[in-house]
Amino acid sequence: MLSADVAGIGFWSRGLPSWKAAGAYLRDGHIDGSAPAKPAPRLLAANERRRAPETVAVALEVALAACEDAGRDPALLPSVFASMHGDLAITDYMCATLTEDPRAISPTKFHNSVHNAAAGYWTIGVGCTRPATALSSGEASFALGLLEALAQLAGGDAAVLLAAYDSQATGPLAAVSSSVGLLGGALVLAQPGDAAVARLQVELVNAPAPRAPGRLAAYVGANAMAPMLPLFEALATGAGEAWLQAGPEQALRVHITR
């Protein structure tokens, strides 16, 4: 069983643009109708902020929020960025342009099409030279991102940043890779100590994760990163455990204490 303290949390979805807003929604159903449709990450210069794809914007927003919540210098943290699809809008653009006019490919969009784009923007933006990992594993992407972060902690790192995100599917890809809206969540995970939001103990179970949709899933459950929501809802509501899909017949059972 692997364990870690949750030192900081970041969250963003349309209408719930912060972890505080997500908590308010779980308490009383309040949604911020005036919230922007896309984050404006402070790490980027104004011109880069305008050009950054939604996936990069939401990943940077939640990652920085988690670091600030933890009181940790982001430049000192190794990081794990998990996304099921990466940026499907850019993938759709690339495929369409390659079939119609390959010479018209935008260098900026090509640059942003790689799966580690968000990790690259992050390390440059915060001046971090620690290792950064980008991974994808279907619906198990968040669970395996959590497992990777916990493994790095077990290997001796003092703290690790985990950021997870996915955006809207567009074009023909939406028929086979469904995802609606924009969603991101981040945790700063640290060695067990005294100043934590909660303590996690995680075990791998050879059984499917139980399907128990909560209120967050009812609101943003159509996004590809929705498998992360049981843990975030448990952290917000004080529940003692959460189940995360870790594979076709495997799950992470997360025990939560405070």
Image (cartoon, grey):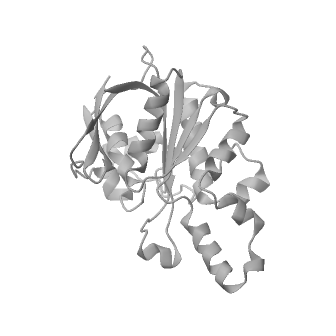
**Residue at the spot 47% in from the left edge and 34% down from the top edge:** 149
Query: Quick check: 56 above or below 10?
Result: below
Furthest residue toward bottom: 100
Residue lying at 76% horizontally and 78% vertically, measured from the top left: 104
Is any part of residue 207 visible from this angle? yes
Q: Is residue 25 above or below residue 177?
A: above
User: From the viewer's perspective, is 77 left or right of 227?
Assistant: right
Instruction: Please tell me which residue lies in front, 242 or 207.
Output: 207
Where on the picture, by quarter, is residue 222? bottom left
The residue at the point 59 percent across, 32 percent down is: 78
Name the quadrant of the C terminus. Answer: top left
Which of the 4 image quarters holds residue 151? top left
Depicted 40 relative to depicted 24: above or below:
below
Q: Position of residue 184 (x, y in %)?
A: 49, 49
Q: Quadrant of the N terminus?
A: top left
Residue 158 placement, left or right of 175: right
Q: Position of residue 56 (x, y in %)?
A: 62, 53
State the image coordinates of residue 201 (x, y, percent, origin top left).
32, 27
